[in-house]
Image: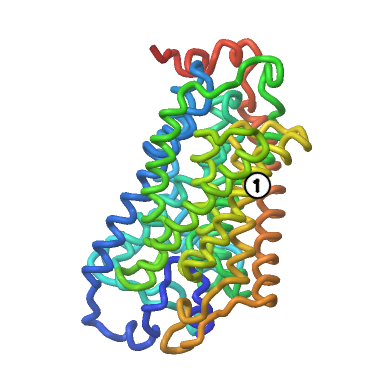
Amino acid sequence: MRFLARGAFAALPALLLALPAFAQDAEAKVDTGDTAWMLTSTALVLLMTVPGLALFYAGMVRKKNVLATMMQSVALAAIISVVWMVVGYSLAFGEGGSYVGDFSKLLLTGVAANWDKPFVLGSGDAAAAMTIPETVFIMFQMTFAIITPALIAGAYADRMKFSAVVLFSILWSILIYSPICHWVWHPNGWIFALGALDFAGGTVVHINAGVAGLVCALVLGKRVGLGTENMSPFNLALAVIGASLLWVGWFGFNAGSAVGAAGRAGMAMLVTQLGAAAAAIGWMFAEWVTKGKPSVLGAISGVVAGLVAITPAAGFVLPVPALIIGVIAGLAGFWGATALKHALGYDDSLDAFGVHGICGIVGAILTGWFAYGPLSGTTAAPDGVSGSFAQVILQFYAVAAVFIYTAIGTFILLKITDLVVGLRVTEEEEREGLDVSLHGERLG
């Protein structure tokens, strides 16, 4: 089976068996070890958004916008949960065709009746049998759907109306996230069929969110006072705590994407740690050389850059390539968050594109070069996918497709949102701070 041979879908690991025997086995049971690991991983990934991302972003904005920034993460965790249950999961993992799922799982139709049974994703030669209940798979994937639009908030921090955040994020989750998720991770998806590799979300989550963030920054324009007023982070201690929670939660993000408690999950966890560490060192080194001092903000930004870059590769690479990917990501993230942003003049407030977009692209492309065949192999295709120039080209196609679709789609959705509720707060509200002007609250 092409899927099993290539290991292209993060949530369908090499340990999965062929469909027919599984589907016909009325006595099939869930694997309790795999299920326990996936329940743990799901909680870890949710931890990445609340409180991880909420604290990380809140610590980097000004005091007058801390609560509003945290509110974005908390509100989206709630809103996207419902969107995913109602329609998002069906569009992402319903049978559908090459480009989007269908409405067969609208409101999670049919899931309740099979709550204690393993399930099959897809059909025919491309299908794969899961060893966990579909309820657990839905919840695990929900946490990915939650954090992706929440990441975009880093680009429009300090200036987008809360009503616009809500409307835009709902539309974006349904019309951008779910289709791309289907392309990459459903056996029917066209990127899946192409053979491009994305173990845990390099394209689906990070490039997707990073490019959307770039478009948001360009459409909304710069923050009032940028370049003339002090934009220093309010509390880097909060940002360090948030980054640390992201680091820990990322083990669920990457190792959990093996969908099983086995060797592949162990390797994914190991290379995740190594990629994050190497990128932090790379960023600190670049900052030390160019600015004379390594900063706390640079160190934690480097950690996140490495986590982003290793995400698409986590289930496909060995430790030494993970170090290489991490170092490159640290240097690339530093360049994206400093030189590139300043050269092009856009205001990506918290470097959503500079870190997630740039490092997501780096990780996705390098996955094609460093992929280690046996990690993605199965009994059907024990050699799996080995890194090659041809695989790099496939990775590039996937990156380009996501970049273009997300950029155009995000621009259209922002314009629709602007027509319906308006995008940006007034200058007076921005100067007063979003905590008071949007939520009527004040920090301390």
Q: Which residue is mark 1?
A: 211
Q: Considering only vertical position in the picture, is 302 above or below 379?
A: above
Position of 66 with respect to 130 (left or right) is right
Position of 28 with respect to 124 (left or right) is left
Q: Nearer the viewer, residue 308 or 218?
A: 308
Q: Considering only vertical position in the picture, is 10 above or below 215?
A: below
Where residue 408 appears, as percent x and y from the top left, is 72, 48
Position of 1 with respect to 215 (left or right) is left
Residue pictured at 53% horizontal, 59% vertical: 181
Quadrant in the picture for the C terminus: top left
Q: Quadrant of residue 219?
A: top right
At mark 1, the secondary structure is helix
Q: Considering only vertical position in the picture, is 428 above or below 202?
A: above
Where residue 332 appears, as percent x and y from the top left, is 65, 49
Q: Nearer the viewer, residue 225 or 339?
A: 339
Residue pictured at 60% horizontal, 16% vertical: 430
Residue pictured at 65% horizontal, 67% vertical: 395
Res 179 seen here: no
Res 183 seen here: yes
Where residue 431 appears, as percent x and y from the top left, is 60, 12
Position of 132 with respect to 66 (left or right) is left
